[in-house]
Amino acid sequence: MATTKARNYLITGGGRGIVRGLGRLLLQSGHRVCLLDSDSDELDHHASKFDEKHTRGRDFNIVVCNLRKPNEFESAVEQANRLFAGHLDVLINNAAHTGGVGSANAGNISLDRWNASLETNLTAPMLMSQHCLPLLSRSGERQEGGSTITISSTRAVMSEPGNEACSTTKAGLIGVTQSMAVSLAPQVVRVNAILPG
């Protein structure tokens, strides 16, 4: 059943995990969805399932973007905006690098793996929010701004062995979410975090 008002959703980490179900649910409810991921094969597979009931370019779209490469963000948001026509309702910062979880700890984690977590899990949500802000802010006839939802984790407050990089970045997301919520309030953009676990 379609909702009375279709909303526009941009979701990072859209090629796998919980987004498969979330994207399907949003489309079934009549919303428009743009999925962003660095894995083109996973995105194509995901999109092929959506193609069975929805129209690519009208109901949904996919964008390949490596969140560890900030120079790709502007183009990715521009591609998403072709679907949204300047109006983004919800940005969901879902993507996360989880390589080494459960095995890479303070005694053996490499700098590359540590930086991969920082860049993907913490820096990318802030930069993606920054790039999407013009599409989220209240302007013109738009009476309310959009919102960002950042997917943190219970690992932010309760860790397990071998979770140093994941726990650090997920805790950092709570801090950046709280700060952005205050900073973006004048633009009527809501900022929240969810801690699955």
Image (cartoon, rainbow, N blue to C red):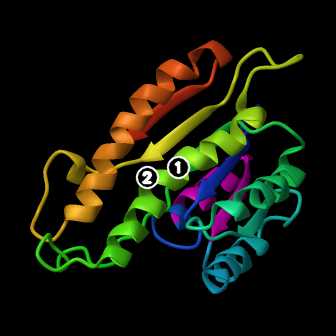
Q: CA distance from mark 2 to mark 1?
A: 6 Å
Quadrant (top left, top right, bottom left, bottom right) of the C terminus: bottom left
Give the vertical position of 173 relative to 161 (above or below). above
Q: Residue at x 35, y 35 (%)?
A: 175
Residue numbers of the magenta segment: 21-37
Residue closer to the observer: 32 or 162: 162
Residue that numbered label 2 is attached to: 122
Residue closer to the observer: 138 or 42: 138
As shown in the figure, which amino acid type bears the numbered disc 2?
Leu
x and y percentages locating residue 40 in the rendered image: 67, 82
Left or right of 113 on screen, residue 87: right
Number of numbered discs = 2
Q: Quadrant of residue 76?
A: bottom right
Q: Residues within 10 Å of mark 1 (few under 14, many from 20)?
A: many
Q: Residue at x 54, y 44 (%)?
A: 126
Left or right of 139 on screen, residue 42: left
Residue closer to the observer: 1 or 34: 34
x and y percentages locating residue 83 in the rendered image: 86, 53
Residue that numbered label 1 is attached to: 125
